Image (cartoon, grey):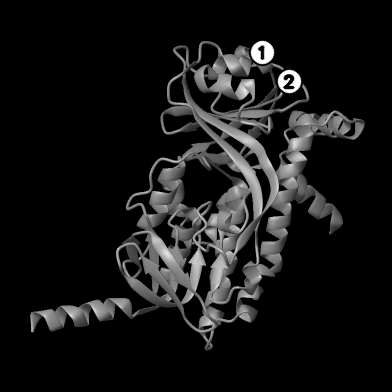
Amino acid sequence: MIVLSMKWWAKERELNNIDVAVLGGGTAGSLAAAMLGRMGISTILVDIHQVYPVEFRCEKLDGDQVDLLKKTGLVDAVLAAATPMTEIWVARRGYVIGKKQGKHGEPCEYGVAYEDLVNVIRRQIPDSVQFICAKVTKITTSSDRQQITLSNGDTWSTRLIVVATGLNNVVRGAITRSEISKCHSISVGFDLTSKAGFKFQALTYSAEKPGPMGYVSLFPIGSRMRANVFVYHGDMRHPWCQEVRTSPLSALYSVMPRLKRLLGDAVVSSDIQIRPVDLYAAQNHEQQPGLVLAGDSFATSDPAAGTGLNKVLTDVDRLCHHIPTWLATPGMGIEKIQTYYSDPVKVACDEWSLGEAFYNRSLASDTTLLWRIRRMGWIGLDMMGISIPQLRLMAASAVR
């Protein structure tokens, strides 16, 4: 009798029926699970990490991203775990040429470790959403129901699969990737301390001359002063990339000698994290019924351009806008899935993100006359204290 009961219980687990299975518990997946759960849609979240581990990714939120977070309903929880910045110095060639400030004394940006961001979002997921700590081993899709098999032996039947596994391609064979730019940029991260203390709350320091050096961003995360360095060497084997692993400040001062005027007696106080970024986009995704890609699973972004979180938040917002409509009628064919990929807001954000990746690299390294003029223009805007969001607002007002 006990054996029969156990067999019945195992069969029930194999036939678990839900509306949405979210695969991947980073920012995109956790946000989607939280929003879908709050909408009353039966959802599971699958990820290999019970608690999201330390990972060198997005570490700052700007004003545009905070506005996008407001649409998720999770902004208060996220900002409570972040460190506000009310003033950011903008410097070139060792001198402060401008200061970015929030309106009415409000923060203009926030610093937050990526793992803290993800784990805060996870804590906002309703209890109705089941979290499963496992790896996806098999996916079967159709125009009606989908099936996923997990490493713990469970099999789940679902109407829709949301893939948000980032660089881990769990949909092997059916969906491929198109490489757009190999090692487009390289990000370096570490903490700094100073006995004399830092004169600035946060600092953005641009390259002192055109070349592969992008810029340095220094900002607080809690009690730490965090440094993010962005370069365009295009090869992790470059001598500078090797030097920055062992002597990051020496490597920085070799290409930005005047930066030392602002950092004084600063020393490195943490491990060095280095992340090369390839730009790629998914292929064949529009022909896959019952499955959608969000965040880096759909297309990567350039951290140096700072558009990654915009892309993730936009993907999740538009996806959660479409899913209730899809679930309201039978089936999950490609005609439904394509409404997400062709969503004008998503398309515009994807195009903007990719454009910013190449624009910022050219702005840093291109030595032609056109780009020299453009660099002088940005220097002028920095000196006037005009930020990119402010510039966009001014342009939009001029059009109206």
Q: Residue at x 86, y 29 (%)?
A: 372
Inspect this view and state whether residue 262 appears. Answer: no
Secondary structure under badge 2?
A: loop
Asked whether 326 or 73 is in front, the reply is 326
Do callouts 2 and 1 mark residues in contact (Cβ within 8 Å)? yes
The residue pinned by badge 2 equals 208
Outermost residue on the left side: it is 1
Q: Residue at x 84, y 59 (%)?
A: 400
Q: Is residue 229 above or below residue 314?
A: above
Asked whether 290 or 339 is in front, the reply is 290
How far apart marks 2 and 1 lie (CA) works out to: 8 Å
Q: Is residue 49 left or right of residue 309?
A: left
Name the image quarter holding residue 317. bottom right
Residue 384 lies, in percent from the top left, at 76, 32
The residue pinned by badge 1 equals 257
Viewport quadrant of the N terminus = bottom left
Q: Is residue 294 above or below residue 361?
A: below
Q: Is residue 75 left or right of residue 282?
A: left
Name the image quarter holding residue 148. bottom left
Q: Amino acid at mark 2?
A: Glu
Q: Amino acid at mark 1?
A: Pro
Inspect this view and state whether residue 29 appears. Answer: yes
Mark 2: give few (<14), some (14-19) or many (20+) Cα within 10 Å: some
The disc, 2 or 1, on the residue closer to the chain's N-terminal end is 2
Residue 252 lies, in percent from the top left, at 61, 19
User: Where residue 216 is drawn, which disc sits there?
Assistant: none
Asked whether 186 or 169 is in front, the reply is 169
